[in-house]
Image (spheres, rainbow, N blue to C red):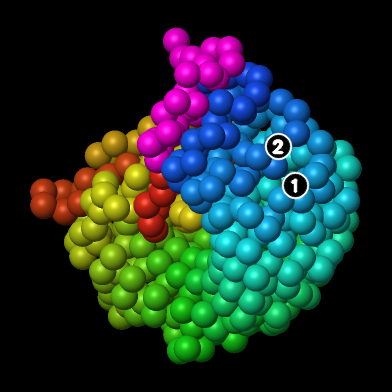
Amino acid sequence: MGLAGEIPTSVSSLNRLRDLDLSGNELIGSFSPLINLSRLSYLSLSNNHFSGNVPCSLLTIPSLSILYLSQNHLIGTLETMNCYSTSMLESLYLSNNRLSSGSLEPLSKFFYLKDLDLSFQNTTDPVNFVSLGFKSLESLDLSGNAISRLNIRSPNLKELALNECSINEFPTFIKNLPKLKTLRIANNSLKGEARQKWFSIRRFTVYLNLRNNNLTGNLPNIFDKSSYLITLDVSHNQITGKLPRSLTNCTNLEFVNVGSNRIADSFPFWLKDLPNLQVIVLQSNMFHGPIYSPQHPLSFPQLRIMDISGNKFTGSLPHDYFINWSKLLISIPQEKREYVGYDSMYDYYPSMYLRSKGINMELEKILPKSSFEGNINLCGLPLEQSCFSDKVPSTPEAQGPWPQKQEQVLNWKAAAMGYGPGVLFGLAIGQVFYSYKPVLFFKLFRL
C-alpha cells in the first residue's frame, strides 16, 4: 500500500533534500509543503491524484531542474504559468493530464527548458502550437493531442514526437530544425505518395517512424553514404514497389520495419552488407522467390530478429541455414534494455506486431515456424511442410497480401531461439524493445 492523502507538512523541514520521488501513490491536495525545499533539484510526483492548476511557485523552486507531473488530474491552461523568468527547469513532464491551452507561448520562454512532454492531455480542444520559439529545447513530445496548427522554431531540437495527433500533412517546418535526429509521426493520417523530402529531411536524422499512416507509392531511392539513419519504420501503410537498394548506404542501420504494406520484391539478400543490422521485418507484403541461394549465402553478423511471414516466398530452409546467425536476442547489452515495453522521448524501442487469429504466446529457446508461415511454397524446418513430401500444401482462403485492420493485433514477446548445438539465433515475432540511453523514469509511449 502506497502513500495516500495530502503531502505531510513535515516534508517542508527537509531543507537539505535534493532528490524526492513520490510517484506511484495516491496523493492529493496542495503542493505547498514542497515549495520551501530550496535545494531540491529532482522531483517526481507522477502517477498520483493531484488536481487543479500547476502553481507557479512549484515551477520556480530555486534549484529544481527536473519535474515529473505526468498521469495526474491537472487541469486548466498553461497560460497561467507566467513565471518563466525565475525558473531553472530543464525537464518538465506533464503527459496524461487534462491541461488545455490556446497558446503555449509562456512555456517557450522558459530559458533553460530542454525536455518538454505535453503528450496525451485528454482534452477534445484542438491545441494551437503556433510560432513556439524554444531557444534551448532539445526534446518535445506532443503526441496524442488534436493539433490544429503547428509551427515550431527551435534551433536545438533533436527529438520530436507527433504520434496520434490527427496530422494529415507532413509538417513543413521540420526542414527548419537543423539538429533534428528523431522524428515520430506514427498513427496519423498522412496520405499520398511517400515523398522524397520526407526521407531526406536531414542527413543526420537517426530515427524515422512513419508507421500506421496512409502512405502510398514507392519508397524513394535516395539514401546516400552520408546518412546516419539507425531506425526506419514505415510499417502499416500502403507502400508498393521495391525496397530501395540505396539502403545499403546506411551503414549505421539497425532496424528496418516495412511490414504490412504492398511491397513486391525478392528477398533482400543485399541487406547482409549492413554490418549493424539487427532487425528485419518484411511480414505481410508480397515478397516472393527463394530466401536461400548458394550464390547468396546469408551472413548477417548482428541479426537477432527476422519476420518474413505472410509473403510468397518459395524453396527450402536447409538445416545449416542459420549457421552464421549467431547473435542472441537476450544478449542485448544491459545498457540497452533497462525496461521492456515502454518508450519515452529519451529512449527508442523499435517495435513489431504480428496480426494473428486467437494466438498469443511467449517463445523461448525454440525456432518458431510462425516467422515463416504464410509462404505456401516454402518448406523445411521449422515448417511442417517437408521438402521431400509429395504432399502439396493446400491453398489458404483468398485474402489480400496484407492483413485486414479488423484482425487482432497481438504483441509477441521476443525471445532467444536455438537451432542445433552451438547455434543460437534470435528469430522472433512480436514486440521488441531496446533502449539507447539510460533514463531516470519511464512513461508509456504509444507508437
Q: Is residue 268 above or below residue 23?
A: below
- Which numbered circle lies on residue 264? none
* Residue 106 highlighted magenta (yes or no): no
**Is residue 240 rendered to the left or right of residue 289?**
right
Closer to us: 62 or 90: 62
| In the image, residue 65 above or below residue 179 | above
Q: Report the Cα–Cα distance between label 1 and label 2.
A: 8 Å
Tell me if mark 2 has few (under 14), some (14-19) or many (20+) residues whose alpha carbon lies within 10 angstroms of its own: many
Q: Amino acid at mark 1?
A: Met
138 vs 339, left or right, is: right
The quarter of the displayed image where residue 49 is located = top right
What residue is rendered at 52% in x and 80% in y? 204
* Residue 161 appearing in the image: no
Q: Quadrant location of the N terminus?
A: top left
On the image, numbered disc 2 is attached to which residue? 54
Q: Residue at x 71, y 26 (%)?
A: 51
How crowded is the residue under tag 1: few (<14 C-alpha within 10 Å), some, or many (20+)? some
> Is the Cβ of the residue at disc 1 closer than 8 Å to that at disc 2?
yes
Q: Which residue is mark 1?
A: 81
- Left or right of residue 35: residue 334: left
